[in-house]
Image (tube, rainbow, N blue to C red):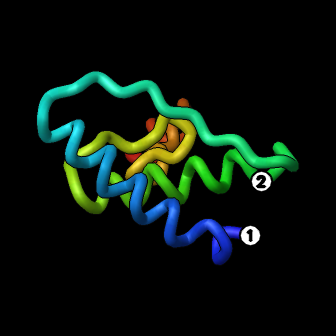
Amino acid sequence: QIEVNEPFVEEWAHQLAQWLKEGKMLYVFCHCPDEKYSPGLCSALYQRVQALVPLPPLPWQPEESPVRPMTLLDLLSET
């Protein structure tokens, strides 16, 4: 339940952003009593930090939708 953790996520986001601005290398993980909620909590924290300092998108959450590779049929239809 992100609502319950909201104040903690916000506080940690600001702390992590501060450390990043200081040039520190961070290794962060999130843990919940029920691990099925950990990925969502991690994503929420990352988005909060990303709103405060420039961070690349996570590998499994690309910024833009992937470009569909061109096929032979695409080439043939252009001629």
Residue 71, labelled with which disc? none
Point out which mark residue 1 bears.
Answer: 1
Amino acid type of the residue tagged 2 in the rendering: Tyr
**Image quarter in which the N terminus is found:** bottom right
Q: Position of residue 33 (x, y in %)?
A: 83, 47
Q: Which residue is mark 2?
A: 37
- In the picture as drawn, the residue positioned furthest to the left comes out as 22
**x and y percent of residue 75 in the render?**
44, 37
Q: Residue 25 lies in what quarter of the image?
A: top left
Question: In the structure shown, which secondary structural element does the residue marked by tag 2 occupy?
Answer: helix
Whole-Å distance between the Cαs marked 1 and 2?
8 Å
Q: Quadrant of residue 57?
A: top left
In percent of the image, x 42 and y 65: which residue is there?
10
Kindly identify the amino acid type of the residue bearing the numbered disc 1: Gln
Q: Residue furthest bottom?
A: 3
- Residue 26's x, y, as percent? 36, 27
64 and 59: which is toward the camera: 59
- Relative to the observer, which residue lies in front, 56 or 74? 56
Q: Are marks 1 and 2 in contact (CB under 8 Å)?
A: yes
